[in-house]
Image (cartoon, rainbow, N blue to C red):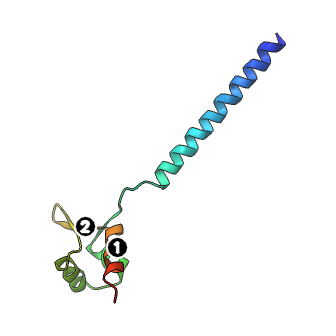
Amino acid sequence: MEYLINRLKETISFIEDEVKKMKDSKAETVTESNQPEYLNTKEAMNFIKCCSKTLYHYRLQGLKSYKIGRKVMYKTDELSDFINSHQA
């Protein structure tokens, strides 16, 4: 009987450890996700500290933007990359 109780405790401990690993893995996936954050024009202007005309000129120079309905959206990582590559 003692053997069965110890074996059951080991099994429960193992399951708890596995559940903890799964939770940790899920948390890492959420925090490290490569999902880009989209910004509208006003948010993008605040993000890179420029006016709407400058942002428009950046688009003409190759800054990638996305039309979603009637809105123009930008990915934060692409904004950062563009600004870093075009700094004097």
Q: Residues within 10 Å of mark 1 (few under 14, many from 20)?
A: few
Residue 34 sits above or below residue 44 on the image: above
> Which residue is situated farthest in the right direction here?
2
Q: Residue 18 occupies which quadrant of the picture?
A: top right
Mark 2 highlights which residue? 73
Q: Position of residue 55 (x, y in %)?
A: 24, 80
Mark 1 or mark 2: whose residue is earlier in sequence = 2
In the displayed structure image, the side of residue 4 where residue 72 appears, left or right: left
- Which quarter shows the N terminus? top right
Residue 87: x and y, percent? 34, 86
Q: In which quarter of the view is residue 71 placed?
A: bottom left
Q: Closest to the observer: 38 or 71? A: 38
Measured from the top left, where is residue 23 in percent x and y? 56, 42
Residue identified by numbered label 1: 81
Task: Check disc 1 and report its element: helix, strand or loop.
Answer: helix
Q: Quadrant of the C terminus?
A: bottom left
